[in-house]
Amino acid sequence: MTYLYSYLQDVLDIPASTVTLIGLMCGVAMVIIRNKLAIPAMVFLLGPITFALSILANYVFARLELFALTQADQWLIATIFSATVGVTVGLCIGAVLARATDKSQSAQSRFHKA
């Protein structure tokens, strides 16, 4: 249990500027795609998912030392890339959930018509 706690502590131990920039980028992405969704209220589900996945991607990039986070330009690139990965994976998860919901509703409507 202490290993899990220390792992979560490492994930959540990122600078406030990084969290702010990731949150801003995820928010802008949600505003842009809000009108493109079949159910616009799904933004309230996708927003936290994309934010959490972006934080997790940032942790993975820092852990693998893909970018030198001591330099400002490398930090910015890593933060933008992690937000992009989080938004992309979050939208894919949302698309899969929407597709599954649509299939189950169409199957139920076919069952009730018969």
Image (tube, helix red, strand yellow):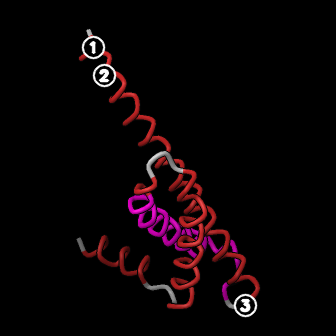
Tell me the mark number nearer the camera, choosing from 1 and 3. Answer: 1
Circle 2: element type: helix
Task: Specify the segment rendered in magenta.
Answer: 43-69
* Residue 109: x %, y % from top left: 30, 22
Q: Name the residue: 24% across, 17% down.
A: 112
> Is residue 50 in the magenta section?
yes
- Who comes first in sequence, dot 1 or dot 3? 3
* Residue 71: x %, y % from top left: 73, 90
> Is residue 9 in the magenta section?
no
- State how far apart marks 1 and 3 are (Cα): 61 Å
Q: Which residue is mark 2?
A: 109
Residue type, mark 3 in image? Ala
Residue type, mark 1 in image? Lys
- State how far apart marks 2 and 3 are (Cα): 55 Å
**Image quarter of the C terminus:** top left
Q: Name the residue: 68% across, 71% down.
A: 66
Q: Which residue is mark 3?
A: 72
Q: Name the residue: 32% across, 16% down.
A: 110
Q: Name the residue: 29% across, 76% down.
A: 5
Q: Is residue 54 above or below residue 10?
A: above
- State how far apart marks 2 and 1 are (Cα): 6 Å
Q: Which residue is mark 1?
A: 113
Q: Quadrant of residue 107?
A: top left
Q: Is residue 38 above or below residue 59?
A: above
- Who comes first in sequence, dot 2 or dot 3? 3
* Residue 31: x %, y % from top left: 55, 67
Residue type, mark 2 in image? Ser
